[in-house]
Image (cartoon, rainbow, N blue to C red):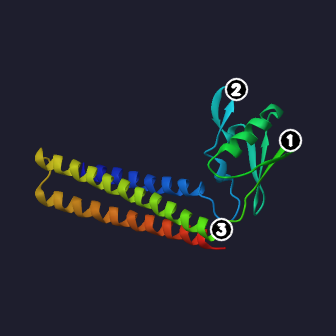
Amino acid sequence: MIADILKQAEHKMGRTVETLREDFTKIRTGRASTGLLDHIKVDYYGCPTPINQVAQIGVGDAHTLTVQPWEKSMIKVVEKAIRDSDLGLNPATSGDLIRVPLPPLTEERRRELTKVVRGFGEDAKVAVRNLRRDANTHIDRLLKDKEISEDDQRRAETEIQKITDRFIGEIDKVVGDKEKEIMTV
């Protein structure tokens, strides 16, 4: 039972780190990335649909994204969705292709983005700590129900803490790497 609790806590903490990495793909760095537009929803015949399901997104060059809707009728809708997003981008249409130039990041904007990155990192750490608390609660419940001994409880809590420390360190590393990437001109 303890092994199951440990394995489940470790799996969930790993998912938290993966979610953090996915969130970081939405944060803009100095170069174009197709993940930047993934969270944008397009009105596809009355239904909000992710942009990558109605168009092909590509990287034109280091500072330009290309979006090619699969239906000609979607060009204006996709362009409007990109313009109205919180990314501050100004797409330009040429025929069937929408070009999305990414303006260079200012020093001030880079500092703001590092604060956002740290916020995401702190949220991920809180999630990991909550998972630790949940695992410890399960262990305490097993002790209370007399299914494990106090020695087993202490060992399990020590192991949970080691797992937590490992994932918190991994989160710190991911946040540090992203901050370095953002601050690189």
Distance Cα–Cα, label 2 vs label 3: 38 Å
Question: Which residue is rendered at x = 29% and y = 55% of the image?
Answer: 132
Considering only order in the chain, which callout, 2 or 1, is on the residue closer to the N terminus? 2
Snapshot quadrant of residue 169: bottom left
Q: Which residue is mark 2?
A: 45
> In the rendered image, is residue 146 in sight?
no
Residue 77 located left or right of residue 123: right
- Residue 106 got which mark? 3
Residue type for callout 1: Asp
Residue type for callout 2: Tyr
Q: How many marks?
A: 3
Residue 7, placed above or below residue 172: above
User: Residue 171 appears at what percent x and percent y?
Assistant: 44, 64
Considering only order in the chain, which callout, 3 or 2, is on the residue closer to the N terminus? 2
Considering only order in the chain, which callout, 1 or 3, is on the residue closer to the N terminus? 1
Residue 183 located left or right of residue 3: right
